[in-house]
Amino acid sequence: MGVEIRGSPVTAEEFADMEEFVHDYLAASVEAEEDGGRMRWYPWHSADYRFNHIRNVVKIAERIAQEVGANVPVVRVAAAFHDVSKLEAEQDVHAEAGAHVAREYLTTRGDYPDSFVEEVCSVVEAHSYQGPLSDVSLETQCLIEGDVLDKVGANGTVLMLLRMGYEARSHMDAAEMVDRVLERGQEHADRVESDVAESIAHQRLKRVKWIREWLESEVAGVDPDERTVEF
């Protein structure tokens, strides 16, 4: 359970209830699909992975919001709902669908100010925006930065290596897969705007680089000259 933020219209208990709702909603989305769930066996298409991702994003986005002076309660709640519809809606509309779920929840399960509800829903709906972060609100920027940064670092590397098993790859492909994390991570690092997000990205990319270097030193046949990302 999180710590209640001073001045927030959402108590710690209410936020815990929101998280429980999101978890149950994701699980129900999987169960409702034909054959028991879309690619349930694939890590990031499971309810457990998606909920873990959401909790990670809440933590990162909240830290960024605190550092840049954004509305922390708005960012926190928007982060909790940002992928609630990820497993039931198509990718290109999951943000809008998530905003609809968030609005329904906030207007029926609490007495939250209309302005708060509107801002949360606006941030959820905008979180999949692919353009410059200077075009969006500060709160949306915090959520987008938190969202992309969860895919970088040790967490992103482990998930990519898990993918090897599902694709019947050998451990000899590990360096190639880690290179993909580095490439994507660098793209995300180049996109973020805030100093704190840049710092997090740099730290996480260093961890991926270490893993790549360990593979070079321990696995025969891994060619250091094949590295695709330089630091």
Image (cartoon, rainbow, N blue to C red):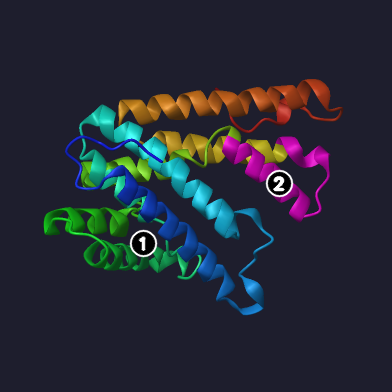
Q: Which residue is depicted at the point 55% across and 33% down?
A: 153
Q: Position of residue 58 (x, y in %)?
A: 39, 42
Of pointers 2 and 1, the one earlier in the residue sequence: 1
Q: Which residue is depicted at the point 69% across and 61% down?
A: 41
Question: Could you tell me which quadrant the N terminus lies in?
Answer: top left
Mark 2 burial class by Cα count in 10 Å: few <14, some 14-19, many 20+ = some
Q: Is residue 219 above or below residue 125?
A: above
Mark 1 burial class by Cα count in 10 Å: few <14, some 14-19, many 20+ = many
Q: Mark 2 and mark 1: span between their CA atoms?
A: 27 Å
Q: Which numbered tag is attached to residue 95?
A: 1
Left/right placement of residue 91 relative to residue 143 reads: right
Q: Which numbered tag is attached to residue 3?
A: none
Kind of residue sitting beneath label 2: Leu
Q: Position of residue 208 (x, y in %)?
A: 60, 29
Residue 132 visible in image: no
Left/right placement of residue 95 relative to residue 46 reads: left
Q: Which numbered tag is attached to residue 162?
A: 2
Q: Position of residue 177 (x, y in %)?
A: 69, 41
Q: Is residue 55 above or below residue 41?
A: above
